[in-house]
Image: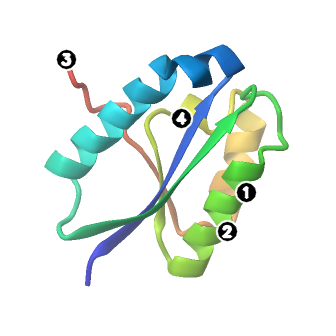
């Protein structure tokens, strides 16, 4: 049985999303983790991306990622905790929800 992940990425501005700069760094860190530190075999079930402020509680792609993670019993994987939210209260609510696990890979460095 393979380890299942649902990947969530977020950038704050449309220009970050269009330039790919913030997304490329998140993709790099996530790939580094999956290739070197994840249980193997693993399966990435989907990648969800919001281009919204981390202070905005309404993020449709995060909701979709959480729904898929719940449905599949997968770990919700983010590159850094601030990709989930800039508000501690929102992060606490997510961690208390029924998402099986939230994986944060900020300790992994590509440099």
Image quarter where the N terminus lies is: bottom left
Residue 2 location (% of width, % of height):
27, 77
Q: Whole-Å distance between the Cαs marked 1 and 2?
A: 6 Å
**Circle 1 — which element?**
helix
Q: Earlier in the sequence, mark 2 or mark 3?
A: 2
Residue under label 2: 67
The relative height of residue 32 versus residue 98 in the rendered view (above or below) is above
Q: Whole-Å distance between the Cαs marked 2 and 3?
A: 33 Å
Q: Whole-Å distance between the Cαs marked 1 and 3?
A: 31 Å
Labelled disc at residue 63: 1
Residue under label 3: 111
- Which quarter of the picture shows residue 109? top left
Labelled disc at residue 39: none
Left/right placement of residue 38 relative to residue 95 reads: left
Q: Camera-side residue: 7 or 81?
A: 7
Q: Camera-side residue: 80 or 26?
A: 26
Labelled disc at residue 81: 4
The relative height of residue 44 versus residue 71 in the rendered view (above or below) is above
């Amino acid at each position: 049985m393979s380890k299942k992940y649902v990947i969530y990425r977020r950038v704050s501005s449309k220009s970050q999303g269009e330039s790919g700069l913030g997304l490329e760094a998140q993709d790099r860190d996530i790939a580094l983790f999956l290739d070197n530190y994840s249980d193997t075999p693993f399966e990435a079930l989907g990648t969800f991306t919001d281009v919204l402020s981390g202070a905005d509680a309404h993020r449709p792609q995060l909701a979709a990622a959480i729904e898929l993670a719940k449905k599949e019993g997968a770990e919700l994987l983010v590159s850094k905790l601030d990709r989930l939210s800039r508000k501690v209260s929102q992060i606490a609510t997510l961690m208390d929800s029924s998402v099986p696990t939230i994986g944060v890979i900020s300790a992994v460095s590509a440099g």
